[in-house]
Amino acid sequence: MQQARVDHGVVSGTFSLDGQTFDVDNNVWVVGDDTECVVIDAPHDVDAILAVVGDRRVTAIVCTHAHDDHVRVAPALRERTGAPILLHPAERPLWELTHGTEVTWDKDLADGDRVEVAGTALTVLHTPGHAPGAVCLHAPELGCVFTGDTLFQGGPGATGRSYSDADLIVASIRAKLFPLPGDTVVHTGHGPDTTIAAEQPAA
C-alpha cells in the first residue's frame, strides 16, 4: 500500500484587504498518494495548483482561512476537479469579500474534524487570531502540521488587519500547536518550513 506524502508548490499573486494590495508568494500543499489527494488552500492560479496535483483525483479543497490569497481560485478549482471546498464557518465575512454571497463553500470545518485521504488523516485545529475561522491541519502520521497563516518561521502570523486579534492568535498557538511534538514540521502558508520546537520561544 502506498504511503501518503506531501507535495509542494509556490504560486505568486496578490493579497488585498482594508484597501491595500500586496504582492505575495503562497505555498500550495498537496497531501495524498499517487491516486488521490487533498489540496490545502487555493491561491492565485488553478493551473499551477493542478501542476502539483498531477493526474490524481482531488477529494477536497481545504482552506485554512478565507483571505483572498488563500481562496481566490477555490471555486474555479472545484469546477475543474469536482472536489468540495471545506472552510470554517467563522470565515464567512472574509469569504464574502472575495466571492460575495452567491458562491459559497460545500462543507463547514470544525475543531477536531478529520479529513481523510490516502490512508492518513488531517485533524482540524481551530486556531483563530489571524482570521476568526483560521484552522491548522495536523497530520501526525506524516509528522507535520499545515498552519496556513497562523504560525510561521519566526512566530505568529500577522494580526494588523480587519478580523484579526493579536492576543487570540498567541493563545491559539499555545493551546493547539505547542502541545504537538517538538519535531513536528510546520508547513506554512508563506515562506519556509520550521518546527514546533523552533517556534516555541517566539510566542
Image (cartoon, helix red, strand yellow):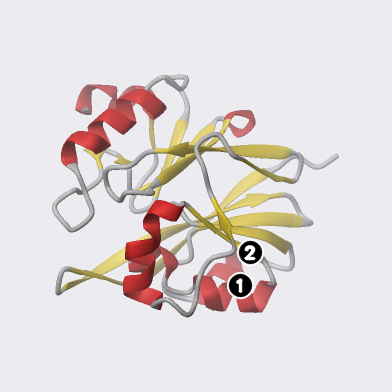
* Rendered location of residue 126, percent (x, y): 43, 39
Residues at marks 2 and 1, CA–CA distance in whole angstroms: 6 Å
Q: Nearer the viewer, residue 52 or 92?
A: 92
* Rendered location of residue 76, percent (x, y): 55, 78
Quarter of the rendering occupied by the N terminus = top right
* Rendered location of residue 140, percent (x, y): 59, 29
Mark sitting earlier along the chain (2/1)? 1
Q: Residue at x 48, y 59 (%)?
A: 41
On the image, numbered disc 1 is attached to which residue? Answer: 78
Q: Residue at x 50, y 37 (%)?
A: 111
Left or right of 182, for residue 113: right
Instruction: Identify the disc placed on residue 126.
Output: none
Q: Amino acid at mark 2?
A: Pro
Q: Are marks 2 and 1 in contact (CB under 8 Å)?
A: yes
On the image, numbered disc 2 is attached to which residue? Answer: 84
Quarter of the rendering occupied by the C terminus = top left
Q: Nearer the viewer, residue 98 or 155?
A: 98
Residue 154 shows up from this direction: no
Left or right of 4, for residue 76: left
Residue 202 shows up from this direction: yes
